[in-house]
Amino acid sequence: MIKELKILFLFFIFSFLPKIELNSQFSRYSLKKLNLRRDHRSSWSLGDSVKEVKMIKAVMAINTQGKPRLTKFYDFLTVEKQQELIRSVFGVLCSRAENVSNFMEADSIFGPDSRLVYKHYATLYFVFVFDTSENELAVLDLIQVFVETLDKCFRNVCELDIVYNYSKLHTILDEIIFGGQVLETSSSEVMKAVEAISKLESSSNSITLVPKTVSGWRNR
Amino acid sequence: MASPSLMDTLFQRSLDDIIKGLRHQQTGESPFISKVVEEIRREIKSTDLHTKSIALQKLTYLNSIHFVDMSWAAFHAIECISSPNFSHKKIGYLAISLSFNESTSVILLITNQLRKDLKSNNEFEVSLALDCLSRIGTADLCRDLTPEVFTLMTSSKVFVRKKAIGVILRVFGKYPDAVRVCFKRLVECLDGTDSQIVSAVIGVFCELASKDPRSYLPLAPEFYRILVDSRNNWVLIKVLKIFSKLAPLEPRLAKRVVEPICEHMRRTGAKSLMFECIRTVVTSFTDFESAVKLAVAKIRDFLVDDDSNLKYLGLHALSIIAPKHLWAVLENKEVVIKSLSDDDPNVKLESLRLVVAMVSESNVVEICRVLVNYSLKADPEFCNEILGSILSKCSQNVYEIIVDFDWYVSLLEEMSRIPHCQKGEEIENQLIDIGMRVKDVRPELVRVGRSLLIDPALLGNSFLCRILCAAAWVCGEYVEFSRNPVELVEALLQPRTSLLPPSIRTVYIQSAFKILIFCLHSYLLQKENIGNDVASEVLGLKSQGECIGNSALVTGKAPACQEQDEGFTPRDPNKSYEDLSIINDGDGQTSALLEKGFTHESVINLLNLIEVALGPLSGSYDVELQERAQNVLGFVDLIKQEIPNHLVSKRASKIVDLVHDAFNEELGPVSVNAQEKVPIPDGLMLKENLSDLEAICGNVQLPSTISFSLGSPFGESVVASVSIPQSKEESETSSESTSLLAEHRKRHGLYYLPSDNKESLSNDYPPANDPKSSDNTNDDAQDLVKLTGQSLLTKKRTSHAKPRPVVVKLDEGVVAPIIAKKPDTNDDLLSDAVRDILLVVEKPDLGNPSSRRSKHRSHGKDKSRKSPDKKKSDEIGDHGDKGKQKSRHRHSKHKSKQRAEGPLNVVAQTPVIPDFLL
């Protein structure tokens, strides 16, 4: 019924697994190009409402049509603002050619000193926005870790998995990034936690299954 | 599974159903969503927590993917987290972390629930609560929950502990007093063996240190140990970031740390760590020759890499180091220039910055040539990026790097003709600025202006009209250098000028008027010469007026100027016309013009031309345009009546003389702080009654030669010098001429600046390049200014009310991009709260006997400030202050408890640092 392209992932496991030496080979990823667009209309200045600096400011997954599939902003923003930011990020993303660098100047969109790193996988862009306390290449690796974890979770992940597993996606992301800080860089650790949480969830759900049905009837 | 319609009526729809529904809906997304939201509003009120949580989950989904407002459901989210069921809790916490903020009113209601969950036995419940706190923690929440977080920091479960450490950042940020409780434990975590914990702590410290590095200097030994020992790249990157903040504060620390960093650079295979090392060295360790060399070598590896990410970062690193070690850029010149044509816009931009950084006095011509050629091929956006950086680089510090202004002016012309050029405003400013500052280039400027004005094709381009405006102004102002003024008038009045916006047409008309006056003036002079036979005298005066470009009124009073000497030479009765032309050769085509002269017919033709062209404009809807056209037409009328045939009435020549004088007064740059900088001359009482202006006036001309930067305390006296001779010579005309001047000012407001501004604007610059500096290197410029001061000073004095907007622009354009690179952007992001923390950090530490930090502190920095409860450590501190051994002894003793297994060399090394530090 719904045709979605399965995403093919090449996995180079490197980076942040503490035991494995980093040996980044970024060039092998399929990359999409961003254009440097300098519009100053929307600045997400953290200065407005003085908030604490977040190392990671936002994580987004946007498909190639510009539909957001996952959004997480580590500072509170109104939905209108979120929508605007996503739109402007996508505007720049889709104007970038294939095989150019994975960095994008985001100062005009997210305020000064922001950096944006993205990676293009088949029909999805994964976008991380962060500030000077992260290393660009390290965040690129982190995206890889994230996607890798998704792949482990969903066995050959595709956009559809991401569409339908909204809450699991957040569970995974929350294990990696905690309140704007990167806390876990090993996808196996993340997997361990996510599996435990899922188990706990389903067990708690199965208990309430009967009352739910009953109460469901009662309420109608 | 029942069909969706049955589900609709009988059962609550799950999130999956909503997603499916959204994907299959035919009616459009927003009606579907609003229907779902309606349904959610109903369901969420259910007393059954399961129904409620599902509804909340759906709402959360719609909120984060379809941007539906969910602030109204805040209370329901709180109900969900109070459920004993884990999945309800999870849904509730997710909703809260996405939708709550400081202004959510019900946020206070979650304190107890959070506390309960933080104390839960289930580590995942604890984790949910911690995550929530880290996202939405307010000052109140953080204050109330600090004890729980503190307890969790020693949790036996790594999973919980690392999150508790992570949440510290939020807690400190919101509730600085928490530092008193938690800081010590946080520092202890640095010694932990678990890499996850260390990674989390280092992350926290990295963030804290980025806000106020100085407070964390005492922890340098710990960081150093991690730098040397850790094999986790993520941790190493963070430690490097900390050190790049700390090193500039403490040179001895930098000396210590630079070697391990180089070691990492040599050893590591990870590009991210490599880049971080490079960045650390090029930002904070630029004084260490060998480290910089190594870093540059590594940068080169990045530059030649096929991966555009690495290339970009390599270029980026180069641009960080460029200001201090330009050789690094020059070494990689080829790569950098080649990158200009890279596919990647980031790479292009970065290499452009580097190319511009390489520009110097000696190579500016070549590099600009290369860049302009690139801009011809580039896409519009990048093209303008290139042009913008050329313009700002060249105008930097008042055209510091430009030696050949003729070249630069023609480069400006060339840039204006580049199809994508959108830098009209900047070019406009520079054309006028150069015209005012650099006298020798005026002939070339007029030539350029002419060729721009005369090209009808340029008139239609809206980006260029600003440039044309400048060209028109330049041609009008410096018309004496024009070969063919009549041609200029024709160009200024060509029919296609109707394409220009009115504001610019007014400048055109005014320029045409100036040129007309010039023509008439020359014509009348000619007549007089023939009639009077004192030709040389008049010519001398005339050339004087032209060469110096000064008001005849002023020059008459300032006979000491160098320029004037030149101008006066023709006075020698033996000198002939040819001599004059030879002398004037460098200055322009004046002589050629004079030789050609104006005939009566040509003047009449000119007047007719103006009349025809401006006639229609006298009915223009634009007020300014209409008025100017009317003025010129009125003048033309008047003159026509006065010179009906070859005879010229005295009155006509007087009128023309007056207007000419008014226009002839030169506009020049003025230093910013000129006023303050000048010591008030002894005889000058600024506040005194100005009745004896004449006396002051006599004084003025001598001091004025001192230097450019000594500028114009002569504000008042300038007026005097301008108006007084006039009033003496022709008392009747003076009022007329000044009123004309005033009118000119009023009309040309565009090019005038309020005189008060002028004082405050420009002295940041070294003296403006004066005419001579165009033949000299810039270093000499200032001396030259003094030498040739006189001409300039007259300029300065007369410039009393003259334009400075250009310089203002330049100021912004030049200084901003260069300084704005990075330095204090971090501070922008700092919240006041954090400063508070750090202030607080120091105090409790001093009072806290067991805090290691306070030991470092008291032992060095604050040795005089002994806190009573700390006598022991202070004693040690006082004694060991200068003696390395003691401090090491103390330190290692202190440490050995926590870190028994540290490698020997580390134990030996680390203690040294605090000594270095303090």
Image (cartoon, coloured by chain):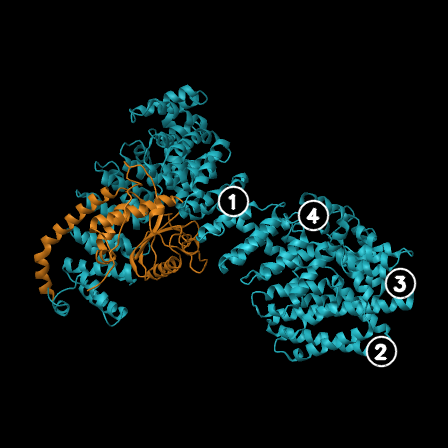
Colour-to-chain, orange = A
Nearest the eye: B255 or B490: B490
Say what amino acid the circle numbered 3 marks: Ala
Q: Position of residue B345 (x, y in %)?
A: 45, 53
Q: Nearer the viewer, mark 4 or mark 2?
A: 2
Q: Earlier in the sequence, mark 3 or mark 2?
A: 3
Q: Quadrant of residue B639?
A: bottom right
Question: Which color was chain B given?
Answer: cyan
Chain containing the residue with disc 4: B
Q: Residues within 10 Å of mark 4 (few under 14, many from 20)?
A: many
Q: Residues within 10 Å of mark 2 (few under 14, many from 20)?
A: few
Q: Which residue is mark 1?
A: B334
Same chain assignment for discs 1 and 3:
yes
Chain containing the residue with disc 2: B
**Residues under numbered marks 3 and 4 in contact, where contact means CB atoms less than 8 Å apart:** no
Q: Which residue is mark 4?
A: B709
Say what amino acid the circle numbered 1 marks: Glu
